[in-house]
Amino acid sequence: KPNMAATGIERRRAMPPGGRIGYFDGADGRPLRYGRWPAIVGQPHGSVIVLNGRGEFIEKHFETYADLLDRGYGVATMDWRGQGLSARGDGPPGKDHLTDFCMRRADLATFLRHVVDRALPAPYFAIAHSMGGHILAHHLHDHPRSFARAALLSPMIGIDTAPLPPALVAMLVALMHGLGRDTAFLPGQGRGGMPDESAKRQRLLTHDRDRFLDEVEAIRHNPALAPGGMTFGWLQAARRSLAALHAPGYAEAIATPVLILEAGDDRVVDNRATAAFAARLPQARRVRIAGARHELLKETDAIRQRVWQEIMRFFKQPLFKPPPA
């Protein structure tokens, strides 16, 4: 059982002891930030790679790392290119702009090779949230020997565009691209700064007000962590990358056992797209967490307990034997 010696705000907002924050060279040599914690038990169960969502950063999920350490795992995580304190992308300052997701996929492979391999004990597991789940799904297709098991939490397998229909969004993205306005902010987005603390934004993400404010406090302490707003180019890149995930034969080629946890009240990603994708995976279990919002591991204690029960049950099943190299 977890050691809850450090509880509440201290556990959520302070870096777990024994870890290291450092930098590695991304796929193109730019510096990307990582966090790594060795297991705190004599015989660890393995190591868990935590992959964050869009706009997130290492500090937001200290509680998750502490939970994993208490459960007998080593932990590693990273700030995606353009997020946290990693090198910013090629877009204008203050904007989260992409031309494609290929570099972030390459960064993940580089991270595993240079930060995780041989530094943390195998077997390797993954917990990936939202956009992190999207990138991980591509990685599992391209690198079937990387992970023994992978848990995707509220994965970005489709984007909830409500109240606009997806076809209209596609037309707007194409129009802005044709006008050379790829770097323009999406409606409602703006330059990096203090995140929106409103109850309206919280209703998209979690029922837990204190955990919702963890991100705000981290950025207040270090404003450089603030994410930039998404651009039309980001959305166009996401749509292309999503189309690749849904291409015939793509999901069917992912051999790694996958657990998909859906938030029952998710209004950020499209659970219907997730369900269709999961049905095509050779080894997948999809579980809907009723009443939960998008950020499952930032939810209430009761919801988090259910999430951890599902993840731990999944990780402790017989290990996956990857296909021959």
Image (cartoon, grey):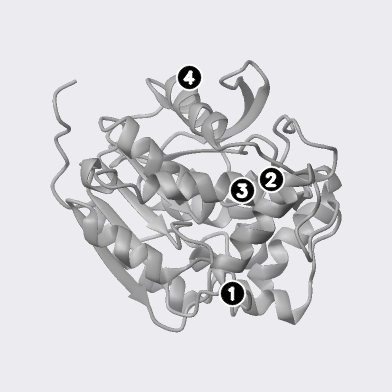
Q: As rendered, which of 133 and 252 lies closer to the eye? A: 252
> Residue 217: x and y, percent?
78, 59
Q: Residue at x 51, y 55 (%)?
A: 64
Q: Is residue 106 above or below residue 141?
A: above
Viewer-nearest residue: 282 or 212: 282
Q: Are marks 2 and 3 in contact (CB under 8 Å)?
A: yes
Could you tell me the amino acid type at mark 4?
A: His
Secondary element under disc 4, as helix, strand or loop, is helix
Residue topped by disc 4? 114
Work out whether residue 273 or residue 227 is closer to the camera in this orientation and state it: 273
For marks 1 and 4, give the CA distance: 34 Å
**Residue labelled with disc 1:** 206
**Is the residue under label 1 in contact with that under label 2 (CB below 8 Å)?**
no
- First in residue order: circle 2 vs circle 1: 1
Q: Which residue is mark 3?
A: 236
Q: Residues within 10 Å of mark 1 (few under 14, many from 20)?
A: many
Compared with residue 218, is residue 146 higher up or lower down, i.e. above or below? above
Residue shown at 68% from the left, 60% from the top: 172
User: Closer to the camera: disc 2 or disc 4?
Assistant: 2
Query: Disc 2 marks which residue?
Result: 233
The disc, 1 or 4, on the residue closer to the chain's N-terminal end is 4
